Amino acid sequence: MSIEFNAEEKADLISRLQDYCDTELDRELGSFEAQFLMDFISETMGPFYYNRGIFDAQALLQEQLEHVGESIYQLEKTPLKIKR
């Protein structure tokens, strides 16, 4: 599974990568080099970020479901005991 970006998103990502390399690494990247590097990062590291996002979303959803369960439990009524 790969994440697909539209042309505008790709251009933005490539520009950011070029700016970073130029500013932080003092290395100027052409469009082709930046595209190649972006593809490498997306294919080799992207799944780690994606999986972490899925894990975090699952944990958050689990927490919210526990709150719902607690709220429902608080709505329960205790039946009156009949004295005989």
Image (cartoon, rainbow, N blue to C red):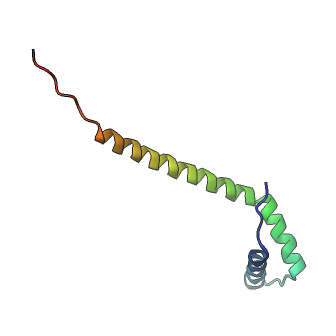
Q: Quarter of the image containing the N terminus?
A: bottom right
Q: Indicate whether 16 appears above or below 53.
A: below
Q: Is residue 53 left or right of residue 2?
A: left
Which image quarter: residue 71?
top left
Q: Residue at x 79, y 65 (%)?
A: 41
Q: Residue at x 80, y 59 (%)?
A: 44
**Residue 23 image offset from top left, x and y in percent:** 73, 85
Q: Indicate whether 37 appears above or below 23.
A: above
Q: Residue furthest top?
A: 84
Q: Residue at x 40, y 47 (%)?
A: 67
Which image quarter: residue 7?
bottom right
Q: Nearer the viewer, residue 74 or 24?
A: 74
Which image quarter: residue 42?
bottom right
Q: Quarter of the image containing the C terminus?
A: top left
**Residue 74 image offset from top left, x and y in percent:** 29, 41
Q: Indicate whether 20 appears above or below 37.
A: below
Q: Residue furthest left?
A: 84
Q: Is residue 47 left or right of residue 31?
A: left
**Residue 63 image offset from top left, x and y in percent:** 46, 48
Q: How many marks?
A: 0
